[in-house]
Amino acid sequence: MAQARDIAFINAVVRTVDPRDTVAQAVLLRDGRIAAVGSAAEVRAVAGADAEIVDLGGATVVPGFIDAHNHLSIAAFAPECVDCSTPPKSTLAEVLEAIEQHCRSAPPGQWVRAMGFNLAHVREMRNPTRFELDEVAPDNPVFLIDASCHAGFVNSLALARVGIDEHTPDPAGGEIERDKIGVPTGVLYENAANPLHSHSWSDYAERDWDRSVDLLHAKMQEYLAVGITFVGDAMVTSKSAQLYRTADRQGKLPFGVQMLHAADHFFDTHDLRRPDIIDRIKEPGSERLVGGTMKIFVDRAYPAPAIDKMHHGCCAHTGAAFYPKAEVGRLARRAVELDIATAIHGMGNCAVNTVMDAYAQSRRGRSTDAVLRLEHAFVAEPAQAPRMADLGIDLVANPGLAWLWGEVFDMWRGECQHHLKLFPVRSMIDAGVRVSLGSDHPCGSFTPAEIIWTAVTRVSSKGMPVDPEEAITAAEALRAYTINAAHASNRAAEEGSIETGKRANVVVLDRDIVTCPTDDIRSAQVLRTYVDGECAYRRPVAAAAI
């Protein structure tokens, strides 16, 4: 929908996030673009005669938040899945009871997906078994997705549905957990969970594509309510690409989405010799749907990320990778040849080195402006930051995960590993790395204010300080969630800052998150969200009726 008339915001704190971090008092939106930024008098002078003049009474205007690493196509189905979030649930009994209640009304034989389970937050500190799930779901195949998405827990019907039994070998890059006599326990790690991800997701989506589009649209409305105006979906298969393209054709993408294309299944390794994969990645997009990028996984969460630890002066490697190191380099080089951008997932310091080596090889002897993205760097070395900056790599970090996952990542790091830091964003920024913030939702909260607060405070939900020396300022976090994320998404020419000519994607906040007390950041409320100059969200309370 085209913007109907000029909109002028005055009496505001306009944080432009331009190269000088200019703070203005007014901004004019016209024809879906930023038409003027400055004082109220300057903006009024160029506003149309019929312009809507909105006095914000001192509220703050920021660029729309860009969540460069999100899993929207998974999160969209949460309303129809079983909510097993821990917290607020705190025991396995509560988790199993929620699944049992859902299955009582589910048609026999229909897939049941459950989401949000994190064993670090249940009293028993263990995963449910297939036999426990059998008891509460005797007539439905159940797939309980670990909150990390890197593991899943299933009952016997689900195992039978995808053909996993005691004779099934572990797939490359995955593990089927078994008991002492070789019987699968129902716990599936990484690539072993691929068929469960695919079968259950497709069952939900293909029951009714129009309903699935409506669920996607509804989730995007939730994102608008917290100020998100662009999302990068960091794991798009052919089926989820079909969902996005259907929604786009129906005009039900209320803001822009970048698809970061996976292979056939969730954690599958890429094969860029296949024309169908290349065609899907490079298929032309639209105003609201962007392609051209592939997602590559380097290391696994289970048994641990690829981390090089130090013991008595010797290096000891832990964790597991999806690819041989040389193959990551070959994929990165081939992607450059095909004019495909890459977003490479590397959680541990060893994986980070693999990614940097791959990008160094892919750039060697070539002139290209392609964005080089590294996702995560959960457990990394500050000493890696200068090379990352020299290579021009964009780090898409997720410090918001410290809230629910801080203790887990600290366990991954281990004791006395002083060269390693959790979410070392301070070190990266200080070395000149362009850092973006992404939620990784549904692995954690998708609310930018909460994630910015965690990036500033560096504390877990259990009160553990998470390397507080790696904290960043609220101003840095705002830049990381707007213009830096736009760079990482190859959108900086279009959005990410409030500058003349850019898209009018802006958010009105009830407070200035840069200057307010730190503990108030997480309570910041979005009053309005504008996409291309149109009000896409307005807070429905009288106190915010501006």
Image (cartoon, rainbow, N blue to C red):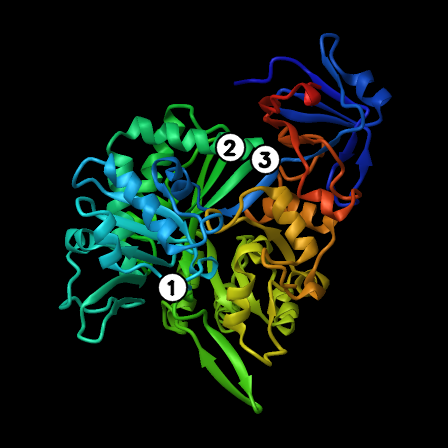
Q: CA distance from mark 1 to mark 2?
A: 32 Å
Q: Are marks 3 and 2 in contact (CB under 8 Å)?
A: yes
Residue 491 seen anywhere in this rendered image of the structure: no
Foreground: 455 or 64?
455
Q: Which image quarter: residue 150?
A: bottom left
Foreground: 99 or 327?
99
Q: Is the residue 282 above or below the residue 272 in the image?
A: above
Q: Are marks 3 and 1 in contact (CB under 8 Å)?
A: no
Which class describes the residues within 10 Å of circle 3: few (<14), some (14-19), or many (20+)?
A: many
Query: Disc 2 marks which amino acid?
Result: Glu
Name the mark on residue 126.
1
Instruction: Name the element at disc 2.
Output: helix
Query: Disc 3 marks which amino acid?
Result: Val
Residue ID at (36%, 33%): 245
In the rendered structure, the answer to whether residue 441 lies left or right of residue 157 reads: right
Foreground: 163 or 428?
163
Image depth: mark 1 or mark 2 in front: 1
Instruction: Name the element at disc 3.
Output: loop
Q: CA distance from mark 3 to mark 2?
A: 7 Å
Query: Disc 1 marks which amino acid?
Result: Arg
Q: Position of residue 217 (x, y in %)?
A: 43, 29
Q: Position of residue 17 (x, y in %)?
A: 73, 41
Image depth: mark 3 or mark 1 in front: 1
Q: Position of residue 332 (x, y in %)?
A: 43, 62
In the rendered structure, the answer to whether residue 505 lies left or right of residue 274 reads: right
The residue that mark 2 highlights is: 222
Q: Is the residue 333 above or below the residue 149 in the image?
A: below
The residue that mark 3 highlights is: 226
